[in-house]
Image: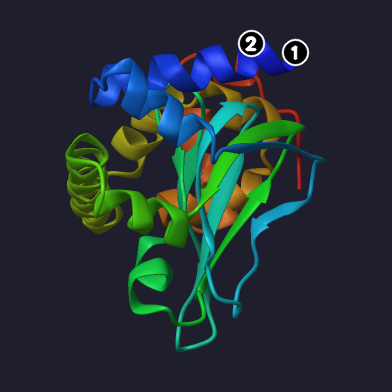
Amino acid sequence: MNHQHHISHIKEVLQSFHPLKEESLNQLLDLVQIKPYKKGEYFQKEYTPAINIGILIQGALMVRRFEEDGTENVVYFNTPDKTPFVGVLESLIKQEDSITQIQAFTESYIGSIKYQDLQNLYSTNIEINSLGRKLIEHHYLIALEQGRYRKSNDDKKKFLILLEKHPIVLELCKKQDVANYIGCTPPSFTRLLKTIEHSENLPFGKSS
């Protein structure tokens, strides 16, 4: 996939999310930098300030939150088709260190823009200002959905939702990370798999 294909993908995502006139779209794209991420590389490290917001073009990312009690929770997955927008809005808005980590778990490409550059465009372009508002609303709704997801006691239902939304996660993620996301222990997750029909054919690529 070459640079022009990456740009075309970003255009498609933006236009489907919030249509922009060509002039506004080009203003935004002029500020976008496309960067490859190797497996294991970080888009955002924990305990450092967030600077960029991005669109995932290819690959998959894991979002992990570091809680005050010392626990680490997998809270989100980014995939291009379902959850392409990448960033830690809490850190960006508050201009504080992020307690969230975003890591590629397969080779990935992200088109990113400095959040401050985006803020500067808000004051001069009403279309991009509307885009920013919709982006914040989008992330707010995602946060609500994730909160409800984690509070559910039905691990099987949560697993099937994950399977439907992000099947690539099952191919590439460690089982312990999937168990953490669902909110159960690895042994409980192993038992859960055995209760699901044809579980032996699920496409896990990692066993630990």
Residue shown at 77% from the left, 32% from the top: 107
Q: Is residue 189 left or right of residue 122?
A: right
Callout 1 secondary element: loop
Q: Is residue 39 depicted above or below 179 in this figure?
A: above
Q: Is residue 204 left or right of residue 95?
A: right
In the structure shown, which secondary structural element does the residue marked by tag 2 occupy? helix
- Which residue is drawn at the image coordinates 35% and 36% (left, top)? 156
| Residue 84 visible in the displayed image | no
Q: Is residue 193 visible?
A: yes
How far across and how far down the image is residue 157, in percent? 29, 34
Name the disc covering residue 5, or none: 2
Q: Is residue 98 left or right of residue 103?
A: left
Looking at the image, residue 198 lies above or below residue 92: above
**Quadrant of res 84:** top left
Label 2: how many Cα within 10 Å (few below 14, some 14–19, many 20+): few
Q: Which residue is mark 1?
A: 2
Asked if the residues shown at circle 2 and circle 1 are in contact, with their CB atoms under 8 angstroms apart, the answer is: yes
